[in-house]
Image: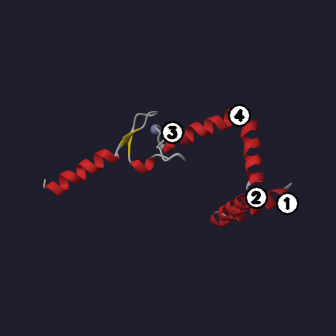
Amino acid sequence: MNTKEVLGVFEWLTLMIICSRCGETRGEDEFYIKKNGKRWSGCKACHRAASTRWRNKNLECARESSRDWCAAHPEYYRQKRREWYLRNQEQCKQKARERRARIRAQ
Ligand SMILES: [Zn+2]
């Protein structure tokens, strides 16, 4: 191994972070960065799992806070929804077709 390779391994090691929740070693991009520039101690997967758990436990509160958020950022919300729709257009159309077929079958 030459110096460059050793440095490469060292760099890789410093980029690997141990998640405080699942204990897995993960790359730097597997962690969210907080608004204050610090990194979350839990990895993205754990973070997502925790927020889903919270959401399921506090459905009313989550619904209300997302409603509040949408009301406060109508432009952003509309744009995000459009982006989402453009990305999932085919699925949406397929779902609509299925729904229509179901209604007709009744
Ligand atoms: Zn984790």
Q: Are marks 2 and 3 in contact (CB under 8 Å)?
A: no
CA gap between label 3 and label 4 equals 18 Å
Residue 13: image x %, image y %? 29, 45
Q: How many marks?
A: 4
Residue 95: image x %, image y %? 72, 59
Say which element carries label 1: helix
Say which element carries label 2: helix
Q: Tell me which label, 4 or 2, sits earlier in the chain.
A: 4
CA gap between label 2 and label 1 equals 35 Å
The residue that disc 1 covers is 104
CA gap between label 4 and label 1 equals 37 Å
Mark 1: amino acid:
Arg
The residue that disc 4 covers is 58
Disc 2 packing (10 Å; few <14; some 14–19; many ≥20)? few
**Which mark lies nearer to you, 4 or 1?**
4
CA gap between label 2 and label 3 equals 29 Å
29, 99: nearer the viewer: 29
**Which mark lies nearer to you, 4 or 2?**
2
The residue that disc 2 covers is 74
The CB of the residue at mark 3 lies under 8 Å from ligand 1:
yes
Q: Tell me which label, 2 or 3, sits earlier in the chain.
A: 3
| Residue at screen point 66% across, 67% down | 86
The CB of the residue at mark 2 lies under 8 Å from ligand 1:
no
Q: Are marks 3 and 4 in contact (CB under 8 Å)?
A: no
36, 49: nearer the viewer: 36
Say which element carries label 3: helix
Q: Tell me which label, 1 or 3, sits earlier in the chain.
A: 3
Mark 3: amino acid:
Cys
